[in-house]
Amino acid sequence: MKNYIIIGGGIAGATIAHQLDSHNLTFDLVDNNPKYNSTKVAAGFWNPIVFKRLTMSFNADVLMSLLKDYYPKVEQKLDTKFVHNTPQLKIFSTKEERHRFINKAIVSEVSQFLDDEPIEEVEGIKAPFGMGKVIGTGFIDTVEYIEKSLKLFESNSSYINGRIDYSEIEYANEFVKFNGEKYEKVIFCEGYHAINNPLFPELRLKPTKGELLILEIPGLSQDYAFAKSAGLIPIGNQQFLVGSTYDWEDMTEDATEAAKKKLLYNLSDFLGLDYTIIDHQAGIRPSSYDRRPIIGKSSKQGNAYIMNGLGTKGVMYAPYYSEMLIKHIENGTNLEEDVDYLRML
């Protein structure tokens, strides 16, 4: 009997699996490896700063420390490259915004993440008030991370390709059973599909559709990511991700012309170079009502757990909160109240 069955193979599920492996715990991961999901169309960018207020993102100092340790180790394990440490330039809209950034960079709780020397010019970027550099930002190639992880799990006989109907899982006090196999516990990492999970009726998700573009922009430096009215992230070969949009009404996974126009309009605010559209993608993010991750035990079944609600910060949240959940299950350590599923009861 294996220790765990994991339902879902996005950032949450794959990260839980790697963390279980590091604790010498056995698992099977079930996923149908769809062409598009919230992970595969995610920009994968991490940023410890909330630009609107120039404050630290939720738990960023702690999250960044584990993030910097976790992903490089998994790169070595998978024998691939998916981590890219890329500084981000915040393009100033006014002199006041510039002065505020510099002041915060000199003395504030976020000084460690801000460079107090503005960058005045980057070819192809319209920045009459200059740009501020955020230190320690970067992104992971989420497709590479997920696909190589699933291939490894498959090679270790720990991956089941398919979708699960909730009725297919049998529960007992000592185990859960699926497809004739028994497991001690189950962890659901289903993304927005969890709104239909009967074991978590109190779950309050706020699914959000996001769309992004992939552009080829000859002549633009790939040494930086850029942020203003849109985000621009270099992914190699003169290509950039542009994103992202937020839609709380349209829950289809179809890319829309309206979102494309909005992204390109926002991009025109600061990009002064010609480009070619390579791709346009959409996915549904599993955001929570309070923008905090959701981890913990089901109120209906004692050996069923959840990790969800990672939203746009999944790359930052996944390493830290997957480790927290495993330690909670295996060692009885407490979950932080801000992320505990029990806060929804």
Image (spheres, rainbow, N blue to C red):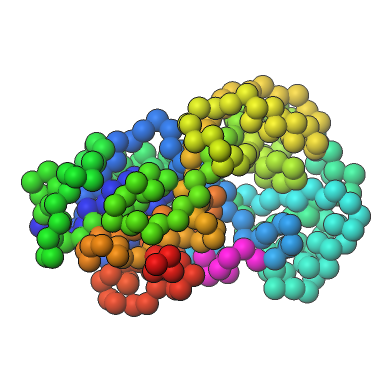
Task: Residue at 60% x, 30% y: name it.
Answer: 214
Query: Which part of the image, by quadrant, shows the C terminus?
Result: bottom left
Q: Position of residue 58 (x, y in %)?
A: 58, 65
Looking at the picture, how far across and down is residue 1, in whole percent? 10, 57
Is residue 72 in sight in this rendering?
no
**Which is more toward the observer, 175 or 5?**
175
The answer to whether residue 111 shows anywhere in this view is: yes
Instruction: Choose top left, top right, bottom left or bottom right for residue 19.
Output: bottom left
- x and y percentages locating residue 144 in the rendered image: 43, 40
Q: Position of residue 257 (x, y in %)?
A: 63, 24
Q: Is residue 20 left or right of residue 279?
A: left
Q: Which residues are magenta?
A: 56-63
Question: Where is residue 221, by image quadrant?
Answer: top right
Choose between 338 and 3: the one closer to the eye. 338
Looking at the image, which residue is at 40% across and 57% down? 203
Q: Residue at x 78, y 55 (%)?
A: 132
Front in this rendered view, residue 304 or 49: 304
